[in-house]
Each structure stands twice: as structure tokens, then as C-alpha cells.
């Protein structure tokens, strides 16, 4: 390996039946490398795929309440919410208003705020309760543990 003028580099590449690939075009003089270009592309795709596999995927778990969910059901669903947050998933808690139960909007909001308050040690509220049609939705993201 050494520094060659571009014509000599091309000659070397054709001798070895390989490609002359420009690595750094902005350098002075431009940096080129003699290699098998198809193999280079294949290796690059493999690296990209490995990086993509390592990237963390966001999982969103949903919990549904009614405006008049009783205490036992609430506690049961809260335990599930705790498990989801401990596993690192985002939580989408919502109150579904059926028929005329929309008149109990305040009860639904109180229920979601109570849930947020009881889960504040496991996660932080990403979006406060917000009414969208017949659903009042709230998002809670898990707190990341510092290592």
C-alpha cells in the first residue's frame, strides 16, 4: 500500500480485477481504495442491519377503563400498568365513554389522574388526559433507570 497518482491506482485495480473506490473525495489529494465494491456494499448492508436490530423499539401497551370502573377492577388494571412500565413499555391509559356516559367526563379525568399519581414512581406523564371523541387518553412513559 502506498500513495499513487490516480492513473497508477486505476492500473493496479484493473491488474487485480478489483474496483477503485473513492473513500474521501474532499481530501487533498482524494483518497481512494482498491477493493471489491460489491463485497463492500454487502458488508455495509450487514452493518446497517445489525445497527437497526440493536435499536430499541418503543412498545405501547393500552389499558382501558370505563368512567365508573370499580376499585377492584381499577387495582387489577393498575397492577398490569405497573408491570408494563417495569418492562419498559409506554402506557396508553384511556377511559372509553359509551352512549350517554360522556356526561361523566370529570370522573374519567379523575380516574386517569389518580392512576398517574399512583404510578409516578415508575413513570412520568407524557400527555395529560385529553378528550378525543368518546375517549379520554393519557400517555405515561417509563422512567429510565440510570446505570
Image (cartoon, rainbow, N blue to C red):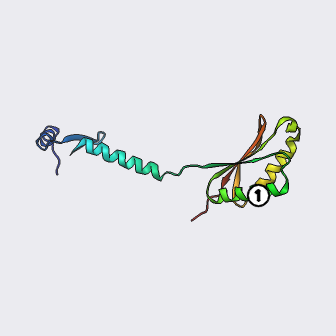
Residue at left 86%, top 46%?
107
* Residue 139 relative to residue 4: left or right: right
- Can residue 30 be spotted in the picture? no
Of residue 30 and residue 42, the one placed in the foreground of this image is 42
Residue at (74%, 43%) from the top-left corner? 137
Dividing the picture into quadrants, the one containing residue 118 is bottom right
Pinpoint residue 101: horizontal percent, then vertical percent. 86, 39
Q: Is residue 55 visible?
A: yes
What residue sits 72% from the left and 61% below the top?
Answer: 121
**Percent coordinates x, y for residue 80 in the rendering:** 70, 57
Quadrant position of the C terminus in the picture: bottom right
Task: Find disc 1 in the rendering and name its residue.
Answer: 76
Disc 1: CA contacts within 10 A as few (<14), some (14-19) or many (>=20): few
Instruction: Tell me the quarter of the picture where residue 8 sits.
Output: top left
Q: Position of residue 123 (x, y in %)?
A: 69, 56
Is 14 left or right of 138, judged from the image as shown?
left
Residue 97 drawn at (x, y percent) = 81, 39
Left or right of 34, for residue 51: right
Q: Secondary structure at mark 1?
A: helix
Left/right placement of residue 17 relative to residue 87 reads left
**Quadrant assignment, res 87:** bottom right
Front residue of 113 and 98: 98
Q: Residue at the location (76% across, 58% down)?
A: 76
Amino acid at each position: 500500500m502506498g500513495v499513487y497518482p490516480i492513473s497508477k491506482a486505476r492500473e493496479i485495480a484493473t491488474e487485480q480485477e478489483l474496483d477503485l473506490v473513492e473513500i474521501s473525495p474532499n481530501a487533498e489529494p482524494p483518497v481512494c481504495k482498491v477493493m471489491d465494491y460489491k463485497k463492500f456494499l454487502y458488508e455495509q448492508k450487514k452493518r446497517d442491519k445489525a445497527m437497526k436490530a440493536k435499536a430499541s423499539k418503543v412498545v405501547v401497551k393500552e389499558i382501558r377503563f370505563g368512567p365508573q370502573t370499580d376499585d377492584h377492577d381499577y387495582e387489577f388494571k393498575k397492577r398490569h400498568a405497573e408491570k408494563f412500565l417495569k418492562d419498559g413499555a409506554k402506557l396508553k391509559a384511556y377511559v372509553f365513554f359509551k352512549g350517554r356516559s360522556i356526561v361523566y367526563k370529570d370522573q374519567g379525568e379523575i380516574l386517569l389522574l389518580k392512576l398517574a399519581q399512583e404510578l409516578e414512581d415508575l413513570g412520568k406523564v407524557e400527555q395529560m388526559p385529553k378528550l378525543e371523541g368518546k375517549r379520554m387518553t393519557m400517555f405515561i412513559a417509563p422512567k429510565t433507570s440510570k446505570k
